[in-house]
Image (spheres, rainbow, N blue to C red):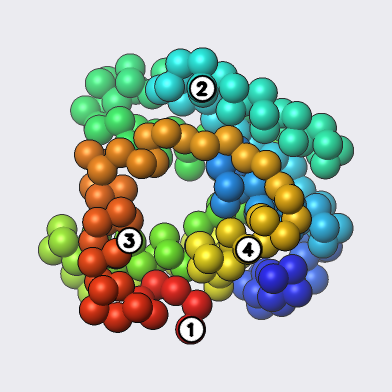
């Protein structure tokens, strides 16, 4: 997977990744931990960014400590932000999820620009694209909304979009990595979680290869 990642990242930016400085959005979850490890093992310059959304009490604080420790082990800079997500959402009349998303990308861009970094990097992968397309279809979006997650959007790049959750899990196990588990990911009350845990498995009953490595 390491070689595939390097090739895909090079293809996205059209140049050698070592010529750029990247800002990795790291939550402490499995996908972002794998992302950081791939950059580290590739010898690509990067810094880590983490937002404490203060939505899960001590668990959120634990995530922040974990990410800071990860950055220390990788010997890279770590930028953090403490966000009052619920207050922001109430002020701007946004759902908690939309408030977190707005805070996230606004702060990431501010941090990137302030520190003269070239790209923001997120850990979205192929399964995220599938789930996004299904979500947009259910919401009645147009053709543009059904294209999924773009691999590159301005200064934001997503170099794991070539990889499935299965391949990420395999790399994680192979490298014996550790991560922080967000218990809310298992709650089907969130639309995207419901698609992940209910809709996709249902579609896989019709086609076992749906959303997996072929």
Q: Position of residue 40 (x, y in %)?
A: 80, 53
Helix, strand or loop for disc 2: helix
**Which of label 4 and label 2 is nearer to you?**
4
Q: In the picture, which quadrant includes the N terminus?
A: bottom right
Quarter residue 179 falls in:
top right
- Residue topped by disc 3: 132
Q: Disc 2 versus disc 1: distance between alpha carbons?
A: 36 Å
- Residue topped by disc 4: 170
Q: Residue furthest bottom?
A: 214
- Mark 3 and mark 1 lie on one chain; the one further toward the N terminus is 3
In the image, is residue 14 above or below residue 104? below
- Residue topped by disc 2: 59
Q: Identify which residue, 173 or 126, lies in the foreground.
A: 173
Q: Residue furthest left?
A: 140
Q: Position of residue 103 (x, y in %)?
A: 44, 33
Q: Disc 4 versus disc 3: distance between alpha carbons?
A: 23 Å
- Mark 2 and mark 3 lie on one chain; the one further toward the N terminus is 2
Q: Position of residue 19 (x, y in %)?
A: 82, 63
Helix, strand or loop for disc 1: loop
2 vs 33, left or right, is right
Q: Is residue 137 visible?
A: yes
- Mark 4 and mark 1 lie on one chain; the one further toward the N terminus is 4
Mark 3 and mark 1 residues within 8 Å of each other at the beta carbon: no
In the image, is residue 165 above or below residue 14? above
Helix, strand or loop for disc 3: helix
Q: Disc 4 versus disc 2: distance between alpha carbons?
A: 26 Å
């Amino acid at each position: 997977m390491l070689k595939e990642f390097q090739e895909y990242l090079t293809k996205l930016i059209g140049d050698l990744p070592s010529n750029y400085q990247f800002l990795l959005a790291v939550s402490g979850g499995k996908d972002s931990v794998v992302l950081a490890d791939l950059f580290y093992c590739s010898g690509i310059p990067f810094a880590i960014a983490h937002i404490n959304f203060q939505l899960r009490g001590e668990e959120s604080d634990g995530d922040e400590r974990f990410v800071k420790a990860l950055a220390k082990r990788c010997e890279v800079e770590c930028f953090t932000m403490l966000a009052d997500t619920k207050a922001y959402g109430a002020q701007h009349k946004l759902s908690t999820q939309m408030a977190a998303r707005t805070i996230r990308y606004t702060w990431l861009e501010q941090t990137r620009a302030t520190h003269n970094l070239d790209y923001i990097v997120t850990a979205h992968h192929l399964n995220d694209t599938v789930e996004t397309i299904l979500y947009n279809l259910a919401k009645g979006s147009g053709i543009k909304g059904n294209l999924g997650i773009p691999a590159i959007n301005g200064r934001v790049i997503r170099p794991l979009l070539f990889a499935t959750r299965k391949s990420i899990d395999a790399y994680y196990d192979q490298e014996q990595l550790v991560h922080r588990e967000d218990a809310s990911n298992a709650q089907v009350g969130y639309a995207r979680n419901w698609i992940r845990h209910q809709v996709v498995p249902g579609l896989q009953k019709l086609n076992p290869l749906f959303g997996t490595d072929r």
